[in-house]
Image (cartoon, rainbow, N blue to C red):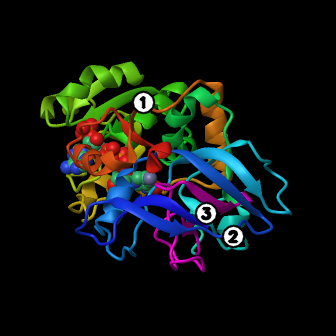
Amino acid sequence: MTIKAFGAVAADQPLGPLNISRRAPSAHDIQIAIDFCGVCHSDLHTVRSEWAGTLYPCVPGHEIVGRVTAVGEHVTKFKIGDLVGVGCIVDSCKQCADCDDNLENYCDHMIGTYNAPTTDAPGHTLGGYAEQIVVHERYVLRIRHPQTQLAAVAPLLCAGITTYSPLRHWNVGPGKKVGIVGIGGLGHMGIKLAHAMGAYVVAFTTSESKRDAAKALGADDVVISKNADEVAKHAQSFDLIVNTVAAPHDLDALLSLLKRDGTMTLVGAPATNHPSPDVFNLIMKRRTLAGSMIGGILETQEMLDFCAKNNIVSDIELIRADEINTAYERMLKGDVKYRFVIDNATLTR
Ligand code: NAP
Ligand code: ZN
């Protein structure tokens, strides 16, 4: 089936309207009419081939929400009309240790929602800046938020799970002190989630304009990371720091803020590496520098249900599909509170 989408045909080209095709649903597939799609910084990294290896045409988008419009004959989890989501994963091998542990995000054969090999035309996956998508039921999530919140639920499918997963993995809860670095799409969800889990949350931002805004999201304290004095007040005090910054920067200033046995996990994925940290900053306090990638499907459902129960959604700015190029430029300047979401109905009007 041919449908309308928005994407780029080369790394140095702006995004524009495209016609793409989707497969007919096979036995375990769900066909979804996409209502809204969040705009992740990974979309921008990929469209511009900043991580290298982008396949064109590139249709990004992995924060997808919509309604089921058709199901394959063996589908048991969903029916037509259900509100559903699709995040960063549309397939995996289903038989390795990672898949068995419901950690498809770490499967060596994980198929990303865009820019990953597939037998469908054009030979690589095309994401959620499109009218509809067809996905195996294993990778489709149920949305329990009210339909009126659907646009603001979309960013949970990547920004939400990418911050929820490390917060859970490192046992964040009451009595724990957590730093969230970079208050963009991921960071603002990190603040909301860590706060809801009962932790003491400190936001680190380069933007003075986000000082009050970060408090409103649930931060107990806000540090302007360019002010060394403000940063130093928190020396050796954090159990966990979740670092979402999308550009290379000095990690040592942040590692020094960890307690003995504290962890800083990187989730930001800049196009070029950070300068190497000082080895002594790790060994003198048995600190850990870690990484984390999105989350598995089971954990993504757990996160969505946690958010529905605690009335957590993303703070969004809804845009038309043809505003995406301006949105990317604004995202690069940190000029969005905190996530752009495309109204996919504007693809056809
Ligand atoms: P975003 O909305 O652009 O937020 C990034 C934030 O980092 C900015 O708002 C800014 O916050 C801070 N920042 C400071 N200096 C920066 C600079 N020079 N360039 C860019 N940002 C800077 O991006 P996002 O969607 O949250 O994604 C953040 C990173 O995580 C990206 O690299 C993305 O590819 C990656 N990511 C990783 C995973 C994973 O699974 N690990 C999943 C999704 C995304 P302040 O204004 O507060 O300083
Ligand atoms: Zn993402």
Residue 315 is marked as 1
Give the structural element (helix, strand or loop) at label 1.
loop
Q: Upstream in the sequence, badge 2 or badge 3?
A: 3
Which residue in the structure is indicated by mark 2?
97
Prevailing SS of the magenta stretch: loop
User: Which label lies toward us, 2 or 1?
Assistant: 1
* Mark found first going from the N terminus, 1 or 3: 3
Q: Amino acid at mark 2?
A: Ala
Q: At 50% across and 44% down in the image, what residue appears?
A: 345
- Residue 99 in sight in this render: yes
Q: Determine whether the beta carbon of the residue marked 3 sits less than 8 angstroms from the nearest atom of ligand 2.
A: no
Q: Quadrant of the N terminus?
A: bottom right
Residue 268: give x, y in percent of width and height. Answer: 35, 53
Q: Which residue in the protein does label 3 denote?
A: 90
**Mark-to-mark CA distance, 2 and 3:** 18 Å
Q: Residues within 10 Å of mark 1 (few under 14, many from 20)?
A: many
